[in-house]
Amino acid sequence: EQLPEISALNLDWFDLYRGLSADGERITAEVYHEPLQRWYAVTAIRIHRDHYVTRFSDITRFKQVEENLVKKNNMLREIYDYSRKLMMVSKAEVFRYIAAKIKALTGASLVVLNTYDKEKATLVCRYTTLSDENEKVIARIIGRNIVGFTTPVSAERYKEITSLLTGSPGSLHEASFGEIPAPVGKIVEKLLDLRQFMSFAIMSDDHLEGTILLAFKEGANLPEAEELMAFSATTANALERRRVEEKLQLRTMELARTNETLLAEVAERKSIQERINYLAYHDNLTGLPNRLLLTERLNQAIMQASRTSKIVGVLFVDIDSFKLINDTMGHKKGDELLKAVAQKLTSTLRQSDTVARLGGAEFVVIVQNILEVGHVDQIAQKVCQIFEKPFSIGDQDYYLTTSIGIALYPVDGEDVDTLIKNADIAMGKAKEKGRNSFMYCTPLMKDKVVETMKLINSLYRAQDNKELLLYYQPQVNCKSGKIVGLEALLRWKHPEYGLIAPDMFISIAERTGLILPIGEWVLHTACAQNKSWQEAGLPRVRVAVNLSMYQLQSPGFIDQLSKILRDTGLDPAYLEIEITESIALKDAEHIIETLHSIKALGVGISIDDFGTKYSSLNYLKQLPVDRIKIATPFVQGINMSDKDEAITTAIIVLARKLGLSVIAEGVETRQQLDFLTRQGCDGIQGFYYYKPMPAGEIEKLLKNAQRGEGGRVTPSPPESLGQL
């Protein structure tokens, strides 16, 4: 083969031939011809002493194959290194690293990395190698960033992407797989002077992980399919691993959240259980120990005292008339007062003492480790001193009093129930003694309480068993001696104790709340009985019925009274309501309002036991009363005490001046009657004329009087009842 260009080779022939051996050994060299850009193999053989044969061969194609093999080996090493480092790159850096590495290995001017969102069937642009400046330029033109751009992938397009590994070289804006939006492709092509692109799918186990777009300037060497396949597999593995890691991280986060939720639920359950346990042993309103915890602590105190021969004091503390506070001021104010009392008790007493609330306005204090009773006195005095100052709730002050009963271990009992019961008994006696006082339990108290409890239990059944009766005591005109009215008096025919007077059980009825149903029964029975007498043609007289303070304070009393009058058909003028002077002085504003409502019904009103409670005359004139009843003690003093006579006379004169009629109670002698008549008293009531009698005897008395036999009765029309 003629190679005219050989002459242009600048070979050092001397050096080449010098290497030849005398026996004709060959020597070979490879030479690159720069102008021709070709490789030649030069072989020289020595045939004679000064003669040589040189052979030239064109090995350019061989050298190119060899160079490609080296390049491929280097590429494989790079891909291996790429794969290894991908495993160490952080999640935040993985996309940047993939794009940068592929750009370096392929020589691409631009790399766009997309991932495939299987759930939304879209390609999402994750990273580009555009500079920040170029990204901003493109963002201004298209109104958004390329990164984050999504392209829907239909089923047909998905199949097309996954079936073709690489795209053919072409213009950037002709990209067919959604790797970059067509409008953006045109902008990028012009901005970066790009003319060719290649794209390949990133596949993992026959499913699409994403795509990579490579853009090149014109004339650039494009990577081969084999290289792209290697990049695809390595990148797919990395993305698959990242996806698994993300799923694992997501699951870990879910488990962490679930764990947090479970921990929160456990904590909440524990908190609820602790709250339940707390409420089981504490009063919900005041936070003080309740009866259950009180029992435990008192048991502990008793056991400790039994070992150390010390005393345990149990103080039963009751706030006086607290029901009245609740009824008048409302339960909300009452609750605030109870909390204030609890706080004062807790802060005043020792930490070793237990303050518990039994319920209502009842508290119990356990005083332990005591050597002498005097120490219990000091504690009781401290409790009383708490109530010497007002309790401030909001902008209002409330003055309270307390009654305290004390029982001591082991003198008054050796168990919890006995000690609390005996302290309660002593508290009742302290209440009778006077407000803000304390008393110790005594054997006599215990016996009386046992009897009282028997009465209470019997009283609950008395109305249902029809054991309650009404007696009636006539009221007589002083001058004529005629019957002008009747007072209904309650009696209890007890199956064991016989006939019991009201002063033996009315206070019990008031404490237990039975006074309300009993009082309603008395009103209804008296009105029905009077109406029955009238319908029988007997003389029409008024019937007076005593009312308890609790009835007057009951919110529905006026409606109740009105209904009784309607149901019985009694003319209201033949009913008179009696209230004691002490009732009239309590809760004055409310009492006056209630009395006016009673008066509006047409019912008469009288004040019983007048003169015993130091009534204010200014207050008396505000009461809508018709009659005053002089108390028995003043009447009993007539002809024996000048002072009693003076008071009696003054009451009669006062009543006259106020336009009220007067009845004297407890008249038993002729001298008393004569004195009262001389002073101008209108009527009397007492044993001098009649004792209280059952309804049957009153009916006979009225019939006899009507026939002119026996007692004289004056049939008084309603309009004349004001003056006896």
Image (cartoon, grey):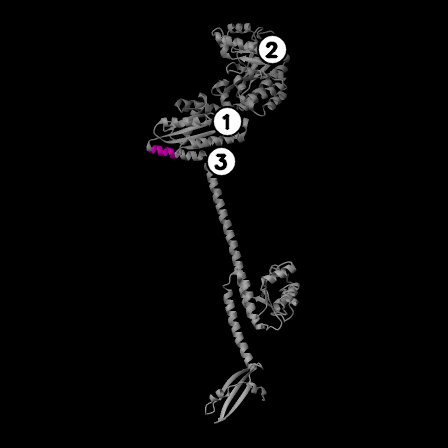
Q: Is residue 278 above or below residue 182?
A: above
Q: Is residue 5 above or below residue 724?
A: below
The residue where tag 2 is placed is 723
Q: Toward the viewer: 228 or 216?
A: 216
Q: Is residue 131 above or below residue 277?
A: below
Q: Which mark is residue 398?
A: 1
Q: Quarter of the image for the N terminus: give it.
A: bottom right
Instruction: Tell me where residue 514 appears, x and y as whole percent.
Output: 52, 24
Q: Amino acid at mark 3?
A: Asn
**Mark 1 neighbour density, 10 Å: few (under 14) some (14–19) many (20 or more):** few
Q: Quarter of the image for the C terminus: give it.
A: top right
Mark 2 or mark 3, earlier in chain: 3
Label 1: element kind = strand
Separation of residues labelled 2 and 3 (CA atoms):
58 Å
Residue 298 lies in magenta, yes or no? Answer: no
Q: Please identify, in this view, whether the residue under mark 1 or under mark 3 is nearer the observer.
A: 1
Label 3: element kind = loop
Q: Toward the viewer: 392 or 42?
A: 42
Q: Is residue 484 visible?
A: no
Mark 1 or mark 3, earlier in chain: 3
Separation of residues labelled 1 and 2 (CA atoms):
43 Å
- Residue lying at the far bottom of the rendered structure: 48
Instruction: Tell me where residue 554 appears, x and y as whole percent.
Output: 56, 24
Label 2: element kind = loop
Range covered by the magenta-colored residues? 300-307
Secondary structure that dominates the magenta span: helix
Q: Amino acid at mark 2?
A: Gln
The residue where tag 3 is placed is 284
Q: Amino acid at mark 1?
A: Tyr
Residue 301 lies in magenta, yes or no? Answer: yes
